[in-house]
Image (spheres, rainbow, N blue to C red):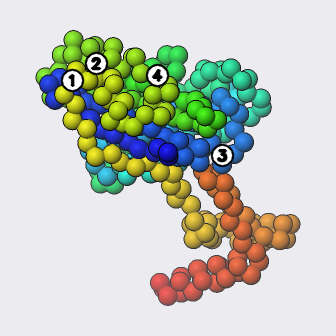
Amino acid sequence: MSNNTLNRYLFEDLSVRGELVQLDETYQHIITSKEYPAPIQTLLGELLVATSLLTATLKFEGSITLQLQGDGPVSLAVINGDNNQQVRGVARWDGDIADNANLHDMMGKGYLVITIEPKQGERYQGVVGLEGDNLADVLEGYFLRSEQLKTRLWIRVGEHEGKPHAAGMLLQVMPDGTGTPEDFEHLEQLTNTVKDEELFTLEANELLYRLYNQEKVNVFEPQPVAFQCGCSRERSAAAIITLARDDINEILAEEGFVALHCDYCGTTYSFDSAQVAELFAHQAGENKTLH
């Protein structure tokens, strides 16, 4: 059974909302685009789960990007997702990564950049220090400081039956101010009992019933999560004609073609001399028409 879904749910009597995301193929797609060391695969899985959970909090059309940057062996790890739960991600590193490397070993002195881009309205960006043992700690601190909303995240990445899985849950006090600390702590304790295998394998309704069978839980329609890369041959062509023609000709003389590689999905778009000439001729024709 393939599982790439996000479920939102609401506790009817407790003014707390929750989310559950379970990913296998989507996560596998992202980590197979490059030969990532195991700790970076885990880091990308954690970012993927977190981005999906945060994207589900959007009340508008738009996207969220979680980007880790640092001076350690991993210089960049980024996941982007939108309100349709279309996600993509990539990481860049240099040198060897120890098998037991944690967030701080990989990123060194680093920070998390959270970028929210609504299709309509102002772009928002927040920068968060890497305070805490893991990504969930970092994000919980961000919510407490910026949103003043009590939030807990459970992020699990691992293998089940030989295949990589990533999953997670989020609990958050409703912003209407009616939730109590006691209610939240009660649900927190219940959610703390969740096991990796349950998160990776159980259907959402069964998992939520196991955790919260004494509560009234309203589960909304599940939303599929899918890998979606925005690259295309057309976009690559558009990028080529923004470069100086002399530079392009130099590459063509050396290589015989111009190639653009997409880090997100691993696709390479190649253009030979005739195709490049056609691109620039088409651009020149358009410029004449504009004048």
Q: Badge 2 is on which residue?
A: 187
Q: Is residue 208 above or below residue 83?
A: above
Reading the chain from its start, which is encountered first: label 1 or label 3? 3
State yes or no: discs 2 and 4 in contact (Cβ < 8 Å).
no
- Residue under the point 70% across and 29% down: 73
Q: Is residue 1 above or below residue 42?
A: below
Number of the front mark, 4 or 3: 4
Disc 1/disc 4 C-alpha distance (Å): 20 Å
Q: Badge 4 is on which residue?
A: 195
Q: Badge 3 is on which residue?
A: 32
Task: Give the amino acid type for the residue marked by disc 3 in the picture.
Answer: Thr
Q: Nearer the viewer, residue 236 or 21?
A: 21
Disc 2/disc 4 C-alpha distance (Å): 15 Å
Q: Secondary structure at mark 3?
A: loop
Task: Give the amino acid type for the residue marked by disc 4 in the picture.
Answer: Lys
Q: Nearer the viewer, residue 143 or 171?
A: 171
In the displayed image of the protein, which residue is found farthest to the right?
254
Number of the front mark, 2 or 4: 4
Disc 1/disc 3 C-alpha distance (Å): 40 Å
- Residue under the point 53% across and 82% down: 287
State yes or no: discs 2 and 3 in contact (Cβ < 8 Å).
no
Reading the chain from its start, which is encountered first: label 1 or label 4? 4
Reading the chain from its start, which is encountered first: label 2 or label 4? 2
Please tell me the numbered disc located at residue 251: none
Task: Give the amino acid type for the residue marked by disc 1 in the picture.
Answer: Glu
Residue 197 image position (x, y, % from top left): 50, 27
